Image (cartoon, rainbow, N blue to C red):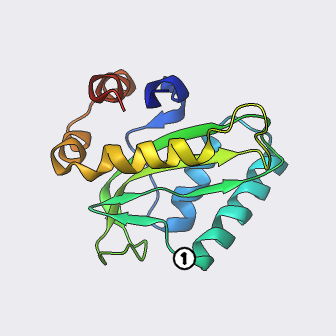
Amino acid sequence: MKLREFFSADAVELDLKASTKDEALRELVALLGLDDPSEAILVKMLRRRENLGSTGFGGGVAIPHCRSLVVKRLRVAFGRTQDGLVWDAVDGGPVRYCFLIVAPPLEVTNPQYLPVLGKIAQFCKDPATVDRLAGLETATEFLDLLEEKAT
């Protein structure tokens, strides 16, 4: 299983307009192309998850994630903001790179949620890889980086 398999260009936004964590969550959820009621439910669930503990991974990265009935399969998105957001990250720094993961409550036939979360964390552990996220100009370049790193 490779991360590249789960991402599509239409779920990548390299210029998030958000100035707050809540705005970023809304923009990331919008990348999934769900209907308005489903988007509202997901944003509420992600906020609730953030209240349990920040998904700010450190090094400028956040990995907001949850399980929800509004999706039938694992869905992912990536967003980048140039300015950085206050996210209560573990290192206290701003977040510029957000990887969203949403999965159905049960993945009996093909459990992917935790492995994908782990692969994203592994991808983001390399500071040189994270630094490369800053210079990306297109969604295709993001997808190519995922492929190159073969995580």
From the viewer's side, name the closer residue of 24 and 109.
109
The residue closer to the viewer here, 13 or 111, is 111
Q: Measuring 75% from the left and 38% from the top, which residue is drawn there?
A: 34
One can see residue 79 in this view: no
Q: Which residue bears the numbered disc 1?
A: 53
- Tell me the residue at 77%/31% (across/down): 109
**Nearest the camera: 65 or 108?**
108
Residue 53 in view (yes/no): yes
In percent of width and height, residue 81 lies at: 36, 52
Task: Please give left or right for residue 74 compared with residue 105 in the image.
Answer: left
Against 65, residue 12 (above or below) is above
Q: Where is residue 137 in the image (x, y as percent from the top left)?
A: 27, 30
Q: Position of residue 36 (x, y in %)?
A: 79, 46
Q: Residue 11, located in which quarter of the rendered image? A: top right
The C terminus lies in quadrant:
top left
Pointer 1 local density, CA inside 10 Å: few below 14, some 14–19, many at least 20: few
Give the amino acid type for the residue marked by disc 1 in the picture: Gly
Q: In this view, does 107 lie above or below 43?
A: above
Front-lying residue, 134 or 113: 113
Q: Residue furthest toward the left?
A: 128
Q: Name the side, left or right, on which 114 lies relative to 69.
A: left
Identify the element where label 1 is drawn: loop
